[in-house]
Amino acid sequence: MADKQDERRQQILMAALEAFTTKGYDKTSMDDIVRASGLSKGTLYWYFNSKPELFAALFEMTTAQMLAAFDSVLSGTEALSPPEALRGMLDGLADAVETNPVFSLLTIDFILQALHHAEIQAKISMYYQGYIRRLAAVLHSGIDQGYFIEVDVHAFATGLLSAMDGVSMLALLLEGINALNGYELRMRDVITSFGDVMIRGLMKGDKDAR
């Protein structure tokens, strides 16, 4: 019975993902999600009482996947120096932007709706806290091992995360920007260039940024 309920819930969330990424939060109705899911309205409301509740659950699902991918990258950098670990994390972000552009689109809606719905704000705050905690741990390690200069690791991690959010959102406009520029620019190149400058700025004068 529990497996069937989990299957139904996942079916609704995937239908909501399709609807929200196609029409955006404001223009998507619960009826749209009912049609996309192929389930009855009663079934939808049995699992989720409102659109904000459903949107918060969708955010939780997608961010859990992103954090799991992030943790996978971190586990693969345990034998690396802190500068290399940071580069590995940025490579992981580039992979996410390239393979899951839908998440960038949803992030914009998540942030906007967090301003109006306490439940969504709580979910998104926990997500960012998780990222900041993971980044701060790598920065602490770099300082302790003598690679990095002394910085406020939580402030730096928050600034880095803010910059990366901007990069991932800009990815949604990259095709139009490239058309105006007349040359091909990939978000991976943007992330790599930014990361190189950031890591060099963190390094102590007697350390190699590699």
Image: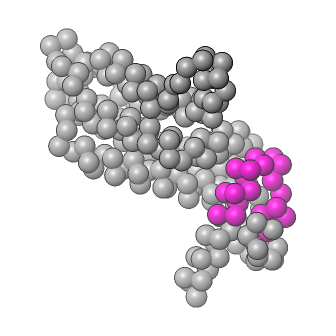
Query: What is the chief secondary structure element of the magenta stretch?
Result: helix
> Image point 71% across, 39% down: which residue?
112
Q: Position of residue 186 (x, y in %)?
A: 50, 29
Residue 34 in view of the camera: yes
Q: Is residue 98 left or right of residue 37?
A: left
Residue 140 in view of the camera: no
Q: Residue furthest bottom?
A: 1
Eyeballing the image, is 132 above or below 57? above
Q: Is residue 124 magenta?
A: no
Identify the image quadrant of residue 84.
top left
> Image point 76% across, 74% down: which residue?
38
Magenta highlight range: 14-34
> Image point 58% across, 88% down: which residue?
1
Q: Residue furthest front?
A: 182
Q: Position of residue 193 (x, y in %)?
A: 40, 21
Q: Position of residue 36 (x, y in %)?
A: 76, 66
- In front of the other: 134 or 91: 91
> Image point 58% across, 50% down: which residue?
123
- In front of the other: 40 or 110: 40
